[in-house]
Image (cartoon, rainbow, N blue to C red):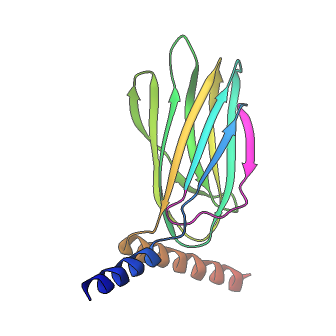
């Protein structure tokens, strides 16, 4: 009897697990590059940007456009080379833009260590289309690594996001009525 109960509990736990998480990797070999990802992100998924631009100097502008189908929390970590006499990127800024180009999130600088600069990007997202944009300047062999994890938002974050989306909907309706 105990074995049947244990098996039933194990089967229920297995069924409750989310679908297989995926990792979508984007490799850029140029300072200016962009891509659109077709598969929407879900809780447990990861986005990885692995960028290395050999012997290139100039403006950095790399974009990745993606979608999420449900409210998600994102947690991103980025690092890039800042060696004074070697490969380097400088004045790097990582932003997340909404479908209409408005700024949704921006990274926060987290310091330097061992020739790398580090930043973090975190916040809550509602369903929709987003563009992750890295800008700055590159010299010689420039590398940028970025990893973003997607998770189910905590209840308090979800409530705040729902309230914010509701407020935006009300403001949009009010503007339409005023026209």
Dominant secondary structure of the magenta stretch? loop
| Residue 109 picture quarter | top left
Which quadrant: the N terminus?
Answer: bottom left
- Residue 63 percent location from the top left of the image: 69, 46
The image shows residue 27, relative to residue 156, as above or below, that is above
Q: Residue at x 44, y 35 (%)?
A: 118
- Residue 135 percent location from the top left of the image: 63, 37
Q: Residue at x 25, y 85 (%)?
A: 2
Q: Horizontal placement of 68 versus 160: left or right?
A: right
Extreme residue toward the bottom, this view: 1
Q: Residue at x 67, y 39 (%)?
A: 27
- Residue 105 percent location from the top left of the image: 53, 54
The image shows residue 130, relative to residue 6, as above or below, that is above
111 drawn magenta: no
35 drawn magenta: yes
The image shows residue 83, relative to residue 90, as above or below, that is above
The stretch in magenta equals 31-45
Extreme residue toward the top, this view: 85
- Residue 121 percent location from the top left of the image: 48, 49
Frontmost residue, 117 versus 105: 117
């Amino acid at each position: 009897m105990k074995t049947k109960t244990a098996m039933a509990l194990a089967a229920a736990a297995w069924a409750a697990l989310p679908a297989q998480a995926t990792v979508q990797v984007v490799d850029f070999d140029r300072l200016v590059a962009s891509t659109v990802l077709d598969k929407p992100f879900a809780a447990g998924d990861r986005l990885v940007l692995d960028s290395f631009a050999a012997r290139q100097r100039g403006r950095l502008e790399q974009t990745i456009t993606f979608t999420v189908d449900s409210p998600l929390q994102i947690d991103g970590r980025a690092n890039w080379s800042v060696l004074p006499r070697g490969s380097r990127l400088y004045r790097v800024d990582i932003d997340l833009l909404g479908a209409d180009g408005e700024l949704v999130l921006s990274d926060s600088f987290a310091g330097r260590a061992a020739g790398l600069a580090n930043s973090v990007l975190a916040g809550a997202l509602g369903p929709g289309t987003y563009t992750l944009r890295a800008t700055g300047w590159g010299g010689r062999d420039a590398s940028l690594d970025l990893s973003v994890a997607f998770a189910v938002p905590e209840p308090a974050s979800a409530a705040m996001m729902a309230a914010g989306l509701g407020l935006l909907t009300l403001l949009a309706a009010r503007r339409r009525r005023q026209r």
